[in-house]
Image (cartoon, grey):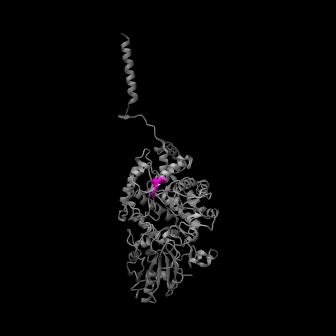
Amino acid sequence: MKKKPLIISVFLIIIVTVVGIIIVKYDGQTEQPAQKKVVYLDPEALIEDRVQDLLSKMTVEEKVGQLIQAEEKSVTKDDVKDYYLGSILNGGGSFPELNVEESSTRELWEEMVDSYQDGALATRLGIPLIYGVDAVHGHNNVKGATIFPHSVGLGSTRNIDLIREIGKATAKEIKSSGPNWTFAPTVASVQDIRWGRSYEGFGENATLVADMGVAYIEGFQGTSISDLKQTSKVVATAKHFIGEGYTDGGKNQGDITQYTEEEIIEMDKEIYEKAVKAGVRTVMASFHSIQGLKMHANERLLTGFLKDELGFDGFVISDWYGIQQITIDHNGNSVSGLKEQIKVSVNAGVDMLMQPENWRETFKLTLQLVNDNEITMERLDDAVSRILRVKFEAGLFENPKTDQSLADSFGSEEHQSLARQAVSESLVLLKNDEVNGQPIFNQLPEMDKIFVAGKNADDIGNQSGGWTITWQGESGDITDGTTIVEGIKEVASNKTVTYDVNGKGAAGYDVALVVIGEEPYAETDGDTNDLNLKQVDLETIQNIRTEDPNIPIIVILVAGRPMIVTEQMDDWSGLVAAWLPGTEGAGVADVLFGDKDFTGKLPISWPTHLDAYDNRDKFDEYILFDYGFGLSKSEVTP
């Protein structure tokens, strides 16, 4: 009879204890037992711990998927999920809706990129995409974006702080539409203006290129790796590794035979040393060769120099089908077929393969190479670790999709103002003759009747150049902006300003401003052995001169590189290099008619003739304007 109360008491104690373990009441809330955090999903964990934790959970197929980059037109949201893809890019002229240029709006870009991210996040491990675009002078793939001057113009400014601010502005506009990675800046030292990518480089001097490149990288990414996780930052790319500005004859994707690898390292080392020190997270291999060996196969430079000597711990991305140009490996052995090209490039140090349309085959063959140990698991893990490291550093696991708060920055007045400043500072005054006893550019603000002519005066496409909306760029009203003649009419609103594209009707005006030069091109399409003015430009000038033999002519060259004007310029009172200014043409007028002076200095030597590049031992004899040359309004032509 005495045992029953004891049993009941013990039973009650057990019940209370169990209930207490399961449910803890405190401040009216129920606290559930703490769950152990998954390391790779823990934003507070160390980056390297997150990398190793995620890597340990991945299958071989998931690892190989991280190495593959597909082009948006050839991939679906389901493909991203099924193949565990690590990256997507939009090539130049690739729009949200297939082949419909009008669909290249910020809103449709955001919808497109976020949809692909949904596919990535739906995978077993939820590894987000790193999404790349060629935003090389603003977010230039998208209509309405602020288009800044191309890099050759920025090199003329010598303004490090300005370049950094342009990087910041561009990063915001990129992120406002979804992508999180830009294939910029180009850090090539331009040694031959016959090269079609000359305008993508900051100039011919390695220190100038290095310092401008660092400023752009810091603008894109922040001044420390920890800044990169901010939603207003993007991953930058130093490209194209290494020495592409030195190719024979200035040929794009060409060979370098006049220099050895050691000499190229010596000339370009400062550029990549500073870029790596600044924390650039990706490097793109170049199409070109050195002594016949394609850079995508150059283990000595990609791994030995870049990764081992310089300590680069981001990842190397191949260029557009770049691995498929490999014909020999670094030992001189013949290479043929995609499978062998994948093997050679990955083992040489390429971590991610840009294979726009044949990415499925690339995935399959890479998987076979790993399974056959022709790409070792150690090398695969190294490549995947580098890619994951950058994704963690960029905060993609925490913020994989578009930050809606950045939408107002896209094409904003603040960014347009910054671009306008860049245009003003990029202008280089090359000729400033005395007219009626004083320099012509000192007189411009006082002149009342201004005549404007030339095919590049009222053309947003021409003044923006290649890599603008489409890959090659195109003439015409391709995006929002202010043309040069519109800017002149705005700034000189108290004057009579008349425009005729062909130069008809110039008689009776105080001065003729002739805006001429190149039309848009990109990459190999821009390679040339003829940088003379086109016949239409010469006819425009002749029309002016025929109508008024005495009118002072000022030529404003809108071009991505120096042009050969040695014989024609004797007839001109003034000459300005305006480069490719982008969408804010009023920046030209701010100097011509406003209170700003010319401050730009040549980033590239200006030759008298293109023969200069075939006579390097006598190069100085062919120079019309030296590197660093640039006048102010009050300085008369020497």
Q: Is residue 187 visible?
A: yes
The x and y percentages for residue 337 are: 53, 57
The x and y percentages for residue 23 are: 38, 30
Q: In which quarter of the image is residue 495?
A: bottom left
Give left or right: position of 162 versus 26: right
Q: Which residues are drawn in magenta?
A: 356-362
Numbered circles on residues, count: 0
The x and y percentages for residue 212 are: 53, 64
Q: Can residue 120 be seen in this view?
A: no
Residue nearer the viewer, 401 or 385 = 385
Q: For the N terminus, which image quadrant?
A: top left
Please check the rendered image and state whether residue 536 is part of the magenta-colored stretch, yes or no: no
Residue nearer the viewer, 478 or 252 = 252
Q: For the C terminus, which image quadrant?
A: bottom right
Judge whether 389 appears above or below 250 on screen: above
Give left or right: position of 384 versus 507: right
Residue drawn at x 60%, y 75% is: 614
Residue nearer the viewer, 372 or 398 = 372
Residue ranking furthest to the top: 1
Please check the rendered image and state whether residue 359 is part of the magenta-colored stretch, yes or no: yes
Q: In which quarter of the image is residue 310?
A: bottom right
The x and y percentages for residue 126 are: 43, 46
Judge whether 64 appears above or below 494 on screen: above
